[in-house]
């Protein structure tokens, strides 16, 4: 039994504010619960009528029915909710669904009402879903704790919905029904005063009836607890996540890295790293979860897709969309092509996508041959319904394939809908358009790739250097990086101009001269950096133009090369977040940055470079020496290990230059330490 069993699987339910007056929320909720097989206790403190089954308190209703309710559903104003829930808990209730609004989301007195309800949770241990939610749905239990019309007709099935919004929960439930997919559990969290996303996901991890989960996220206040719940759940069933807030630019950090990393990006990064498949809108969410509820591939870093189409144009749309998203549609081996040549007309294209010309009875064998190709892990089939030529559903259902099938079927609306439902019941995900079919295939591929990543070992934090007290200047920051095995320029700290001239003689030109002041993070903005200095005259001129500083840093110039920016920052929700981006202005202008939560696996560290739009700059474009990926991964993992020290707030290397031998060198470094008063606790975990 999970901690939420009494919420989602109660033996008896009480409705607070139950009513017999049509149009009232309490009446709608009571009607919705009519199909529940257990007792439904009606409580109305303002208008009790025991003769008609309305009691003034939960205790009196429980006495009359001979059973205390596990769950109370409140349909009363916010101001009265806390007291009523406290009384219900005293009468034996162990969970509450609070539907009313007017709590923290409304501001003013609403915040006080929510605080009072939180105190009830703290004092009694009752679990509360909401407030400000339209409820939850559990069709397999004939439990529709919702006042939305029509939900009682939803069919049970294998998909669970966990939505921040009650409205989105219902919208997705109806969309899944339209797609021919039944609902196992649909939850709208509302304000998440007590029951959170992680709580529901952990509950679902124990439910053998769940085959896939649709996760809708507006805020992710739980941070690492949420990602741990997703990670635990994806061991057994796939999770598809839709994160809202693409246009909301959060205040991630003072550094360039932070300014680029929005809360939306960090949340998506966290969920993807935990194993979730990410989608961009609710239509893709439904398509993806539909496919994954019927098919799940084994772990595979890059599955190959075979495409069979009975109409060339739509098949090309499907293939093009897959390839544009980086999905592998490999050529078939010669043996497969030879077998297809014996089955299909001479003018058809046979080397993936395979064009059959028109639907025909040979389609079954064609699909089977493609599925048997050694490079194919999923076979996608497009066809229009042409009953006079072939019974398409029967042909596909009869195919004995060695890989899973995904179908895309077009035709008259009702016939196509019926076909998609039939194929779904046969375990074949079926889409209505090539675009939807591509979403389904991509979801299968991304889930398989995620499982491969999750199998990689996370690199444990190594022993971090002893950190200095107080503000850290650039030289000290580079000493810390050097102790972590990160290459830094040869340099000298100089107390005055005379020492700077001596350093020039020792190091030889060209050198870079910088002011050394822990309070100035962006030295170039105040004229505190001069480069390319070769002579003592040039050094005197540079020093005359630079602002006053406690000390100077003179260091050897590195050879020219492409530049990266690498940083780690302690996000207030998810803890340490690692970022890799193109250096210079490219990162700011293009938003070209890849993120990971720390700690991470070496596999994830290596993959970060491949996510940059500017990756070709670092992979040997125009004959340049490619970056040593192992050295770059070492830098990323070293910064991730540095972030494990609770004293570190942020560390940024900008730029990290790629040298002619492929190695990388940290040309500038910022290390910020946390206020000791903030180091007592850890980030959300």
Image: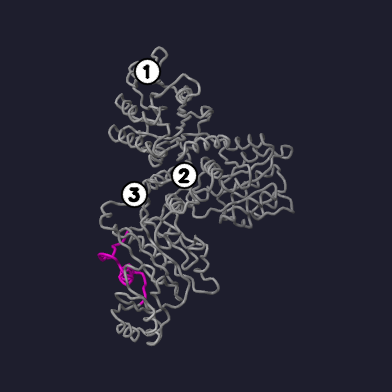
Q: Tell me which label, 2 or 3, sits earlier in the chain.
A: 2
Across and down, in percent, residue 348 comes to: 72, 53
Magenta segment: 461-489
Residue at mark 3: 684
User: Do callouts 2 and 1 mark residues in contact (Cβ within 8 Å)?
Assistant: no
Across and down, in percent, residue 83 comes to: 32, 28
The CA span between labels 3 and 1 is: 44 Å
Across and down, in percent, residue 391 comes to: 68, 37
> Which secondary structure type mostly characterizes the magenta part of the structure?
loop
Q: Is residue 400 left or right of residue 127?
A: right
Residue placed most toward the observer, 664 or 62: 62
Question: Label 1: few (<14), some or many (≥20) within 10 Å?
Answer: many
Residue at mark 1: 55
Residue at mark 2: 239
Q: Tell me which label, 2 or 1, sits earlier in the chain.
A: 1
Q: Nearer the viewer, mark 3 or mark 1?
A: 1
The CA span between labels 2 and 3 is: 22 Å
Q: Residue furthest front?
A: 108
Residue placed most toward the observer, 620 or 189: 189
Across and down, in percent, residue 316 comes to: 66, 52
Q: Residue at x 41, y 43 (%)?
A: 233
């Amino acid at each position: 039994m999970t901690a939420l069993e009494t919420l989602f699987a109660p033996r008896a339910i009480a409705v607070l504010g139950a009513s017999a007056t049509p149009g009232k929320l309490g009446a709608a909720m009571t009607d919705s619960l009519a199909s529940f097989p257990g007792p439904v206790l009606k409580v109305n403190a303002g208008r009790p009528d025991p003769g008609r089954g309305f009691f003034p308190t939960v205790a009196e209703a429980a006495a009359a029915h001979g059973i205390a309710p596990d769950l109370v559903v409140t349909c009363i104003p916010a101001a009265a909710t806390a007291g009523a829930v406290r009384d219900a808990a005293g009468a034996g209730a162990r969970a509450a669904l609070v539907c009313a609004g007017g709590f923290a989301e409304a501001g003013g007195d609403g915040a006080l009402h929510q605080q009072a309800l939180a105190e009830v949770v703290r004092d009694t241990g009752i679990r509360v879903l909401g407030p400000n939610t339209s409820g939850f749905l559990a069709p397999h239990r004939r439990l529709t704790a919702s006042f939305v019309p029509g939900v009682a007709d939803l069919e049970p099935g294998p998909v669970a919905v966990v939505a921040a919004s009650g409205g989105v929960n219902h919208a997705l439930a109806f969309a899944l029904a339209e797609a021919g997919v039944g609902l196992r559990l649909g939850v709208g969290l509302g304000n998440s005063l007590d029951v959170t996303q992680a709580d529901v996901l952990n509950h679902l991890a124990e439910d053998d009836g769940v085959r896939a989960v649709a996760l809708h996220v507006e805020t992710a206040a739980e941070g690492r607890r949420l990602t741990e719940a997703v990670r635990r759940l994806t061991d057994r069933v796939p999770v598809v996540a839709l994160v809202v807030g693409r246009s909301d630019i959060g205040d991630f950090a003072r550094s360039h890295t932070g300014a680029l990393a929005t809360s939306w990006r960090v949340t998506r990064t966290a969920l993807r790293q935990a194993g979730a498949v990410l989608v961009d809108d609710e239509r893709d969410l439904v398509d993806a979860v539909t496919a994954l509820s019927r098919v799940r591939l084994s772990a595979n870093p890059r599955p190959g897709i075979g495409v069979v189409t009975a109409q060339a144009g739509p098949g090309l749309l499907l293939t093009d969309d897959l390839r544009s998203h980086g999905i592998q549609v490999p050529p078939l081996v010669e043996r497969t092509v030879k077998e297809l040549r014996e089955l299909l007309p001479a003018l058809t294209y046979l080397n993936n996508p395979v064009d059959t010309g028109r639907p025909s009875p040979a389609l079954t064998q064609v699909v089977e041959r493609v599925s048997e190709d050694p490079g194919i892990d999923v076979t996608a089939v497009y066809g229009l319904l042409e009953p006079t030529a072939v019974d398409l559903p029967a042909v596909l259902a009869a195919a004995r394939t060695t890989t899973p099938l995904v179908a895309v079927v077009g035709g008259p609306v009702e016939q196509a809908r019926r076909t998609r439902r039939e194929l779904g019941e046969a375990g074949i995900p079926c889409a209505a358009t090539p675009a939807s079919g591509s979403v389904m295939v991509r979801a299968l591929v991304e889930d398989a790739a995620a499982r491969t990543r999750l199998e990689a070992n996370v690199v444990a934090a190594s022993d971090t250097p002893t950190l200095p007290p107080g503000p850290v200047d650039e030289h000290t920051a580079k000493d810390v990086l050097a102790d972590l095995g990160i290459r830094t320029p040869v340099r000298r700290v100089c107390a005055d101009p005379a020492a700077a001239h001596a350093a020039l003689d020792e190091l030889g030109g060209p050198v870079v001269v910088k002011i050394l002041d822990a309070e100035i993070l962006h030295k170039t903005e105040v004229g505190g950096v001069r480069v390319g200095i070769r002579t003592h005259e040039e050094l005197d001129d540079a020093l005359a133009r630079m602002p006053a500083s406690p000390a100077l840093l003179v260091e050897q110039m590195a050879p020219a090369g492409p530049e990266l920016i690498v940083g780690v920052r302690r996000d207030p929700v998810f803890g340490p977040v690692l970022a890799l981006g193109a250096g210079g202005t490219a990162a700011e202008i293009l938003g070209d940055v890849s993120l990971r939560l720390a700690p991470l696996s070496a596999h994830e560290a290596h993959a970060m470079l491949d996510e940059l739009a500017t990756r070709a700059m670092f992979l040997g474009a125009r004959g340049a020496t490619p970056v040593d990926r192992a050295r770059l991964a070492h830098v990323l993992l070293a910064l991730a290990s540095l972030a494990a020290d609770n004293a570190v707030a942020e560390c940024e290397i900008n730029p990290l230059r790629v040298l002619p031998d492929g190695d990388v060198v940290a040309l500038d470094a910022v290390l910020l330490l946390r206020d000791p008063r903030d180091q007592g606790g850890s980030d959300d975990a």
